[in-house]
Image (spheres, rainbow, N blue to C red):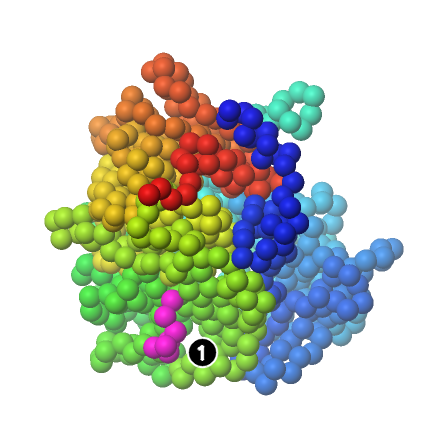
């Protein structure tokens, strides 16, 4: 019967009335129609005085873009029309995938023909266009197509630096002979960008910086020689397999050698910064910038266990370093990207620390003698947005009363007074802000659970709307017509004074006198918060479709997730990834199931990545609670994941083997009793298909039935190729329908 029902789902065509019913969701509506396409939200690049530039669709060349400046009064001016970007001999303008303007706005550096490197399109071609002369020039000389990376204008706007095939180059902005600054670049020696694990776990991609005076370039070099490699097999591209091999340090293994150097843009020898320690075995260097001037660099050195961060100042001329601040934690220390803003004429810098139990902003002296707290209280500074030193204010995101929401606050830089909430009190939900350099205005994005975002320009600090950028009225109207029961945010008391945040989507046409199946969506890792009061896009719509089929859908954040609930909440997962989370999730599920309208015999769970691992742990550890599970791209054995992420939360496997074993789902596979669907992309460079194969091997050994869907050559996101996303969610929907019957029971 199962095969027959699947066949019917593939070949049956829904009636026209069902296809056009505005209250109903289908996979086609969600993934193959424009019904839920929102308004275009332009990317803003700020200029002085509250004006900004953005790309706007060209009216003369279909698919091309004009570069437009919009001032504070909403007056727009086309700086560069698409027609100006037509290369000699071509008929159409180059596609603008990114751009940088010179300070006088005469020159634009255009990024085009971009290609994906692991997660993002960071490799492509670069052109310059000069408005005063109309000259369009391609950079890179005889470089192969799409081989330039991270091109940047020099501070004075006469040169462009870029990475080409792991070497650094500098070239005149109007084109011409390039100066090659490094010569040892190869597939194994990487200059100006990063290896796989630095990119994935420290979010390091652009690996070089112009000095403020344009006279020097600082850059990272990663040497992957000696790092063990992983090979992926592509069986679909050609007649014979294509192999992709890259350095991937799994837990406990050797990392790349990492160092920082300084070189003149005219060429010459590199002066290497003398950072103590062996980065292959003992340390990382995840952050580096010029230290408010051309003479010194500031670096962050993190030890292998990632429970100590040293802030170091390096002399660019000699390479000598001194440590000015050390941050330690009994579990781990996060590397913050909103840290290290220079104040007091460069004599002090801002720093984020959880040393008092909450994430707060501090001001540290450049000489290393003092560290003063700026914000204080029983709340977390989620993200620092803007510092107005002249006014003595800092703007940041926080949510002291509700960790599922985000709001804008302002506090005094001298630490006095109480932080002031600037987001209006009648706008609950999730608020993001992108401040102008002068802090006078910000792009404000506001959404709530089940309600698409509204984007507007607001004045700061009064939060007055200057103009609407994207109202999304049509999308909001479309979503508002969908059959649904209002979502509920709740807290589950699991005992011991621990309460977990969750959201619940009840079935459409909910009747509390009946019993419904309950599907939990899980993640639970230290890398992500799931219970948030904001718009969830396509995944929210799919969950809503399930409620229209008669399922309830819930999500809970266990301890150890990065919620703004204090240091102890987040660090509770240390050396307990997989164990504490699954205990919390199961305890919360039992609490939710006390509600009389849930059917305890029909409980399912699904998740992706760490959520896939959580799904396995819950099915294996609590088989009498969870009857059906769908694990997408899971990590069945933590020992197979990378050094930086897994060791941060679990320590080294050489000294913590038992916790690795206990937290890994594969250890508990014998507990499987219910229905299990495993889904994985065979081209997953992040969470390797290897882990799922090892789990399959164990399940076969244990004679445990399961279902597998391997997506050929798809990555961790399983979204490459036509119809892949719709196919995946169709698979998940059918598996639920077949194994966890939907709808109410008396």
What range is drawn magenta here? 423-429
Q: In this view, does 374 lie above or below 684?
A: below
Q: Is residue 656 left or right of residue 190?
A: left
Tell me what residue is drawn at x 29 percent, y 48 percent.
Answer: 597
Pick the residue in front: 379 or 395.
379
Image quadrant of residue 52? Answer: bottom right
Q: Name the residue under label 1.
A: 439
- Please name whichever residue, 537 or 326, is drawn nearer the observer in this view of the structure: 537
Q: Residue at x 61, y 34 (%)?
A: 10
Say which element carries label 1.
loop
Image coordinates of residue 445 in percent, x first then y, are 47, 69
Label 1 environment density (alpha carbons within 10 Å; few <14, some 14–19, many ≥20): some
Residue 707 lies left or right of residue 9; in this view the side is left
Using the image, determine if residue 182 lies above or below residue 107: above
The answer to whether residue 137 of the structure is visible from this angle is: no
- Identity of the residue drawn at 57% across and 38% down: 727
Would you place residue 543 above or below residue 53 in this image? above
């Amino acid at each position: 019967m199962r095969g027959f029902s699947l066949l019917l789902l593939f070949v049956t065509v829904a009636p026209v009335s069902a296809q056009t019913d505005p209250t109903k969701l289908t996979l086609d509506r969600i993934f193959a129609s424009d019904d839920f396409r929102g308004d275009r939200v332009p990317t803003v690049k700020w200029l002085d005085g509250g004006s900004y530039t953005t790309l706007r669709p060209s009216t003369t060349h279909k698919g091309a873009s004009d570069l437009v400046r919009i001032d504070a009064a909403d007056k727009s001016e086309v700086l560069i029309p698409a027609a100006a970007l037509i290369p000699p001999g071509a008929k159409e303008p180059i596609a603008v995938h990114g751009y940088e303007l010179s300070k006088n706005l005469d020159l634009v550096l255009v990024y085009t023909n971009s290609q994906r490197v692991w997660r993002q399109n960071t490799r492509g071609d670069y052109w310059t266009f000069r408005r005063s002369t109309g000259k369009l020039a391609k950079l890179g000389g005889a470089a192969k197509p799409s081989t330039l990376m991270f091109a940047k204008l020099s501070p004075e706007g006469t040169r462009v630096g870029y990475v080409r095939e792991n070497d650094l180059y500098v070239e005149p902005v109007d084109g011409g002979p390039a100066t090659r600054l490094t010569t040892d670049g190869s597939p194994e020696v990487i200059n100006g960008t990063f290896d796989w694990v630095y990119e994935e776990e420290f979010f390091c991609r652009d690996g070089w910086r112009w000095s403020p005076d344009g006279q020097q370039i600082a850059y990272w070099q990663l040497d992957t020689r000696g790092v063990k490699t992983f090979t992926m097999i592509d069986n679909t591209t050609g007649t014979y397999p294509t192999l992709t091999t890259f350095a991937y340090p799994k837990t406990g293994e050797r990392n790349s050698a990492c160092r920082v150097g300084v070189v003149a843009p005219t060429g010459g020898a590199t002066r290497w910064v003398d950072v103590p320690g062996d980065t292959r075995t003992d340390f990382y260097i995840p952050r580096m910038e010029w230290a408010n001037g051309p003479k010194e660099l500031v670096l962050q050195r993190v030890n292998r266990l990632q429970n100590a961060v040293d802030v170091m100042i390096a002399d660019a001329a000699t390479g000598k370093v001194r440590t000015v601040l050390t941050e330690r934690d009994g579990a781990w220390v996060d590397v913050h990207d909103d840290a290290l803003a220079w104040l007091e004429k460069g004599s002090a810098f801002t720093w984020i620390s959880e040393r008092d139990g909450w994430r707060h902003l501090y001001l540290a002296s450049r000489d290393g003698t003092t560290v003063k707290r700026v914000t204080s209280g029983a709340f977390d500074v989620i993200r620092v947005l803007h510092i107005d030193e002249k006014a003595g204010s800092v703007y940041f995101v926080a949510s002291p009363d509700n960790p599922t929401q985000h709001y804008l606050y302002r506090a005094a830089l001298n630490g006095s007074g109480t932080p002031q909430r600037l987001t209006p009190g009648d706008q609950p939900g999730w608020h993001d802000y992108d401040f102008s350099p002068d802090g006078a205005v910000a792009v404000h994005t506001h959404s709530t659970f089940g309600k698409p975002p509204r984007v507007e320009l607001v004045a700061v600090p009064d939060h007055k709307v200057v103009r609407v950028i994207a109202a999304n009225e049509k999308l909001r109207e479309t979503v508002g017509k969908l059959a649904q029961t209002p979502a509920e945010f709740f807290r589950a008391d699991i005992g011991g004074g621990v309460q977990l945040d969750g959201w619940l989507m009840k079935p459409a046409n909910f009747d509390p006198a009946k019993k419904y199946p309950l599907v939990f969506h899980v993640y639970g890792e230290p890398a992500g918060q799931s219970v948030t009061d904001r718009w969830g896009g396509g995944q929210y719509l799919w969950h809503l479709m399930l409620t229209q089929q008669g399922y309830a859908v819930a999500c809970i954040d266990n301890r150890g997730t990065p919620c703004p609930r204090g240091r102890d909440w987040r660090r509770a997962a240390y050396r307990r990834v997989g164990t504490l989370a699954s205990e919390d999730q199961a305890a919360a599920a039992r609490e939710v199931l006390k509600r009389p309208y849930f059917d305890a015999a029909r409980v399912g769970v699904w998740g992706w990545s760490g959520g896939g691992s959580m799904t396995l742990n819950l099915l294996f550890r609590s088989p009498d609670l969870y009857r059906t599970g769908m694990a997408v791209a899971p990590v069945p054995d933590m020992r197979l994941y990378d050094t930086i992420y897994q060791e941060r939360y679990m320590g080294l496997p050489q000294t913590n083997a038992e916790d690795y074993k206990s937290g890994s789902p594969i250890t508990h596979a014998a507990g499987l009793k219910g229905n299990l669907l495993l889904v994985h992309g065979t081209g997953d460079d992040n969470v390797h298909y290897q882990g799922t194969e090892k789990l399959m091997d164990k399940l076969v050994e244990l004679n445990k039935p399961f279902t597998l869907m391997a997506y050929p050559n798809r990555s961790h996101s399983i979204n490459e190729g036509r119809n892949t996303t719709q196919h995946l969610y169709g698979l998940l929907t059918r598996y639920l329908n077949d194994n966890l019957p939907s709808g109410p029971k008396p």
